[in-house]
Amino acid sequence: MQDFNNDQAKKIITNYLNIARDKENEELYPFDISGVNKLNELVEGNARKFLKNGYFMVEKALEIFDKKTTKIDAKFIVEHFSRDNI
C-alpha cells in the first residue's frame, strides 16, 4: 500500500468518522486539520498506522475531553501519540 498525503489523510478520517454518524458530512470534528496532518506526519503516511492511531486518539479523547479540550488538534496528538500504538 502506498503512503498517502495530508489530503488523503483528511478524506480517510472523514470517512472513518462518518461510519459513526447519523448523516454523512465533511466535518473533521473531533479532529481539526492540524491534528490530522500531525498524525499523518507521525505515522509517515502509513494508512494502517494512521487508522489505528486515529481510533486510539478518538478513544483517548473520550476519556479526557472536558470543556477546555474539545478537539483533537496537533497539540493533543503530540501529547498522546505513542510509538507503542503502532
Image: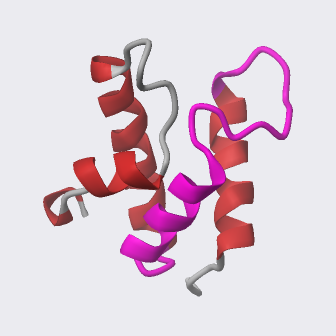
Eyeballing the image, is 61 above or below 26?
A: above
Q: In this view, does 22 lie to the left or right of 65?
A: right
Q: In this view, does 69 lie to the left or right of 29?
A: left
Eyeballing the image, is 46 above or below 27?
A: below
Question: So how many labels did they put on this image?
Answer: 0
**Viewport quadrant of the C terminus:** bottom left
Q: Quadrant of residue 20?
A: top right
**Residue at (45%, 48%) from the top-left corner?**
54
Q: Is residue 69 left or right of residue 2?
A: left
Position in image of residue 77 (x %, y %): 37, 52
Most distant residue in the bottom direction: 2
- State the residue in front, 86 or 58: 58
Position in image of residue 76 (x %, y %): 36, 45
- Tell me how the rendering is colored: secondary structure
Position in image of residue 36 (x %, y %): 56, 57
Eyeballing the image, is 9 above or below 52?
A: below
What span is colored magenta in the figure?
20-46
Whether the magenta-drawn stretch holds residue 62 is answered as no
**Residue at (86%, 33%) from the top-left corner?**
25
Whether the magenta-drawn stretch holds residue 34 is answered as yes
**Viewport quadrant of the N terminus:** bottom right
**Residue at (37%, 72%) from the top-left corner?**
42
Most distant residue in the left direction: 84
Q: In this view, does 82 lie to the left or right of 51?
A: left
**Residue at (43%, 34%) from the top-left corner?**
58
Q: Quadrant of residue 30?
A: top right
Position in image of residue 45 (x %, y %): 51, 78
